[in-house]
Amino acid sequence: MHLNKLALSTAAMAVLALAAGHAAAQSNVSIYGILDGGLVRESGGPGGHVSNIGGGIASSSRIGFKGKEDLGGGLAAVFQIENGFGSDTGAASQGGTLFGRQAYVGLTGGFGAFTLGRQYTPYYKTLRDIGDPFGAVSLAGRSGNLFVTNTRANNMVEYVSPSYGGVKLDLAYAAGEVAGDSTRNRQLGASVGYSGADLTVQLAHHRIDNATATDATRNTLVSARYRFGKLLAHASYAHNKGPRDADSRDMLLGATIQLATGKLLVSHVRHDDREPANNDANQWGVGYHHQLSKRTDVYVAYAKIDNRNAAAFRVGNASDTGTGDRAFNLGVRHNF
């Protein structure tokens, strides 16, 4: 009797092991993240010089989980959830939302990818991946407020097509979820781009519908990147309308120069205000990232904004909007 029980237990364990091995072969879940921290020195703001320890300067600190399950026939289920936090205090970013950076689930296959949840917009990805050497998260991008980037959208359904001859389409719709008005607070986005051996160019548009037609914001962006050996040239041009029919243009020129032990980043951004106030601004940024290993680098960066008339743009970084028109950053970043 004892031997029979032992045989049954051994058989059951073998079946469980086979089942676990089959499940592992069909799905893949990984944990990843970035820890970034350093010194920020700001000046030119109402409070004068400000020095602090930043918890996400070149990149916002984060931890995420992503996975993919093979469903057969080329179809797969995918998901990603990502929490943002400050490495200086451990406090949650994105207003304290648990997975405020990303939270989506979807299906992928030969048709492309359909995903649903909180996601990056096609507009933001165009600037981040192509148009800005700082990745739209440091100095020359999002937090500097010289480009309207519409970073993420809640309740978003997104479709990304496969690449056909280097051409790819990205479509997004985010429901406003306002009772009695299906258009209020909704967001619509799209991008179409071409990527070849050396040239990448992409056109993107983003629209947010608010209470009235004049409260809507509309942002159109074209970004390009071209490789000259170890130098990547970046260029972006944005046309911004609203709310209340406000009108402005943003232009960016930059470069990423690959060096033996790291990379040098430079950029110039011009904000052209088409309103009577003429609140123009120019921003210059330079940075150097030194690779200590494949996953760890140290960096230094400096940026300055020349505000005109009543313009009050500030130099920000990946996590903070900044306090003044000049900023110096020194930090370390680790990817895992």
Image (cartoon, rainbow, N blue to C red):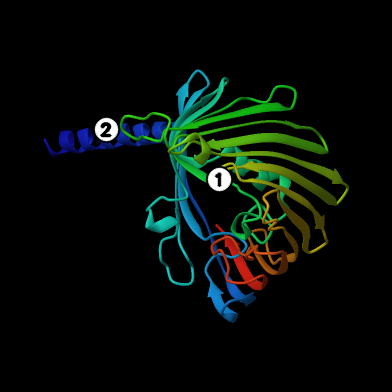
Give whichever of discs 1 and 2 has the lower sequence position: 2
Q: Is residue 180 above or below residue 271?
A: above
Query: Does residue 69 appear in this view?
Result: no
Q: Residue furthest front?
A: 276
Q: Residue at x 36, y 34 (%)?
A: 177
Q: Quadrant of residue 134?
A: bottom right
Q: Quadrant of residue 52?
A: bottom right
Three-letter code, disc 2:
Ala
Q: Is residue 97 left or right of residue 221?
A: left
Q: Residue furthest left?
A: 1
Instruction: Find numbered disc 1 in the image and state the secondary structure of the residue it sits on.
Output: loop
Question: Looking at the picture, how far across and down is residue 208, in whole percent?
Answer: 51, 38
Question: Looking at the picture, how far across and down is residue 201, in whole percent?
Answer: 76, 36
Residue in the foreground of this view, choosing between 164 and 1:
164
Disc 2: which residue: 11
Residue in the foreground of this view, choosing between 65 and 62:
62
Query: Does residue 50 appear in this view?
Result: yes
The mark found on residue 150 in the picture is: 1
Q: Residue at x 77, y 37 (%)?
A: 200
Q: Is residue 238 left or right of residue 322?
A: right
Foreground mark, 1 or 2, reads 1
Residue in the foreground of this view, choosing between 42 and 133:
42
Residue contact at pointers 1 and 2, CB within 8 angstroms: no
